[in-house]
Amino acid sequence: MSDSYLDLARRVLLVERRPLSAKNILETAIRADGLPPHLYGRTPHKTLQARLSEDILNRRSRSQFFRTDAGKFFLREFLNDPRIPEEMKCEYPAPRRSLQLENRSVLSVSRDNWKRKFDDKLLVKADVFRENIGEEDLEYIEVESLAKQDVFLPILSFVLVHRERSVLSYMIGRLRSASDPLKRPRSIGFGGYVLEDHRDITYDAFFGVLESGITILADGTGMPLEIAERARYESEIVPRMCVISKTHLGDEAIFVVADYKCAEEFDPGRPNLSFTGLKWLSSSNMPNDLSNYDPLSWSMLCPNSQEGLSAFPS
């Protein structure tokens, strides 16, 4: 089913052959007497911008649109057009919106299922998890329901970004003017809850876990689209372990730990979009105090970390 707003944007951009804001797209359509009556309203430009942003967020490289700057949109089909100036082809990574989990369902496994498959182990290899956990063992549980029960464990992605013998860390949560950044916990795992939206029929995304990890990592650090797509579809994110651990809020969850070797052409240390306090931790120069790290990060950074769970795998 076509979307009238997206169809309108495509028609205008095809004619204008330059990036435009949602407001400019509508103004151009009105001047050309090409705005359908049912699209008139009090703030149609906001609706159009929301439609374009949602299409880019959900479809990524499969969207026919991309951003060239904050609030400016262009057609992806022009990327290979030699008549279009190169400065109009640079993709702008939009700031990541906070993931709204209210009324959302997240991937979960029952404690009984885990115990039946893995006894009392708190850590299993990722391939063992895949061999023993099937679709029949997975459920999507609403976040509010999870908070009120102790039957299911949510599954979270936990992607470690490596460069040589270093791992990338960041501050958890958003920095507010009244907050003390020294009191905010840190983590070495990029990712979060796994939603049904993270399933992808085009590649094996480990039940959506790897898609969750790369989406949150890419959106939060401004990773260029081509690098994120390469990581997504060329198996550059490698799941290693599944661990039952506490989150920084104290709730238990199943974390799927995966490793990603940071692309040389991407510098996540530059001013970022969502993650604050980005810092490389070297295996040869660790901080003396790890108490401000979330529980799983702390376990992985400790010198005596459990076998296979080190932040710096050999």
Image (spheres, rainbow, N blue to C red):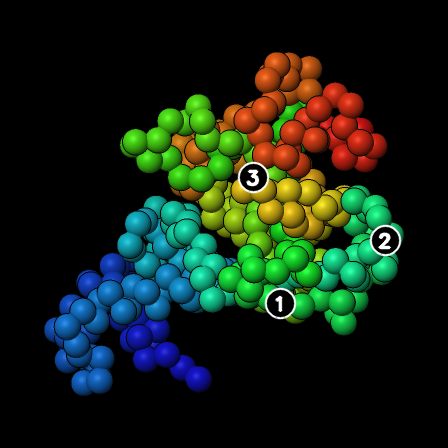
* Crowdedness near tag 1: few (<14), some (14–19) or many (≥20) residues, C-alpha within 10 Å: some
Q: Which amino acid does the dot numbered 3 rest on?
A: His
Residue 119 at x, y percent in the picture: 87, 52
Circle 3 or circle 1, nearest the eye: 3
Residue 118: assigned label: 2
- Side (left or right) of 45 relative to 87: left
Residue 248: assigned label: 3
Residue contact at pointers 3 and 2, CB within 8 angstroms? no
Label located before the other in sequence (1 or 2):
2
CA separation in Å, label 3 and label 2: 25 Å
Residue drawn at x 52%, y 49% as measured from the top left? 216
**Residue 211 seen anywhere in this rendered image of the structure:** no
Q: Which residue is mark 1?
A: 140
Residue 194: assigned label: none
Q: Nearer the viewer, residue 89 or 287?
A: 287
Q: Nearer the viewer, residue 153 or 104?
A: 153
In this picture, is 70 found above or below 1?
A: above
Label located before the other in sequence (3 or 1):
1
